[in-house]
Image (cartoon, grey):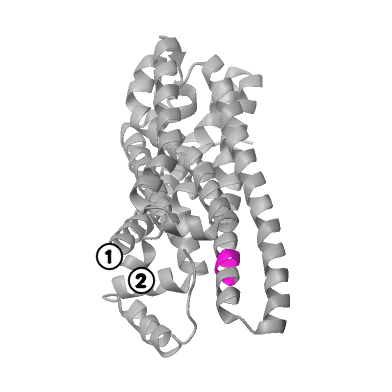
Amino acid sequence: MHINYYDLTLALQTYTIVLCVVGLFGNINLIIATCRHKSLRTKMGCLIMISTIAHTICLVSELIAVKLKLRFNQTHRDECFRSVIVYMFAMLFQSNLFLMMAVDLFLAVLMPIRHKLWRRGPYLFILCVPPLAFSCIALFIEEVYINHDDLLICTVTLAAPPAVRFWGTLITFSTILLAVMLIFVTAVKVHVNERRSARRILRHSNSLTSNTKCSDAKLLKSLSTLIFVFVCSWSLSILLSHISLYFTKSVAYEIQKYNILLSLPTFCQNFFVTGLRSPRYAKAYLEQLSFLPFVNTKLSHFRNNSSVKSVFV
């Protein structure tokens, strides 16, 4: 069977451009909506916006990679590293920020009163320090161990020396595992709180407690969706990159070249997940895009059915 590699290359570049454009459209709308609407600027809402900014940098970097044809030209590892250093920083930052989002949700459920009283600015700064520090340290270590090895293609994963890449993959999956464990513990805590709340409502009919627990449950489901897409796309992409190290060079390069098919959805998901799972975000997006005819019709329908209130982030 004859494979037309030119057609495969064109298909990959087209897929990348289309997904990047769609992702940038969604990400920019999410960032603008969060800046415009105070109701979206909660602690979790701000973390989602920061994550979206990192995703936007990744998408722009992918478009630059398409323009320079980095995935289809031979280069050297040090040159490749310099070409993708901003992309690499944003990718490392966003992957560790997911853990901080899980920590935020855990704290919000475990100690809700204290969590509400903490000042948003310092709190967000503290949560952003670990992923920021990890990204800077990782890039510094890669700079120390970088070499002039020949590369058939240039990708973010290939830019890192093999030894550094191995430990980077191990740390990344450790943070993902920790995030999943935190979400699981939080889910158990929310379930226990809901059962206690149900008994209390039967006795005292306390609707305020019910609303608080409902908010926790919705927040948990939304973050779980983000983590699920993250694990299924970007994490699987990183795992595949690591597995490629154990194949021959020709096979490994082919895996690396088309690995972007898996990782790109991670950088596009925030807008769609928040829009589908949160009426509050959905309303903000509809108002923002009301200049589009079909969106304006949807907004009118949404306003007519606005009796249902959202408690997402």
Taking the image as shown, residue 311 lies to the left or right of residue 199, namely left
Q: Residues within 10 Å of mark 2 (few under 14, many from 20)?
A: many
C-alpha distance separating marks 1 and 2: 9 Å
Residue shown at 50% from the left, 38% from the top:
96
Q: Residues within 10 Å of mark 1 (few under 14, many from 20)?
A: few
Is residue 234 shown to the viewer in this render?
yes
Residue shown at 54% from the left, 62% from the top:
219
Disc marking residue 284: 2
Residue shown at 39% from the left, 32% from the top:
89
Q: Are marks 1 and 2 in contact (CB under 8 Å)?
A: yes
Please provide percent x and percent y for residue 39: 36, 68
- Closer to us: mark 1 or mark 2? 1
Taking the image as shown, residue 123 lies to the left or right of residue 158, namely left
User: Which amino acid, mark 1?
Assistant: Arg
Element at badge 2?
A: helix
- The magenta segment is 214-218
Choose top left, top right, bottom left or bottom right for residue 81. top left
User: Which amino acid, mark 2?
Assistant: Ala
Q: Which residue is mark 1?
A: 36
Q: From what the image shows, is residue 126 above or below residue 304?
A: above
Residue closest to the eye, 269 or 190:
190
Residue closest to the eye, 98 or 90:
98
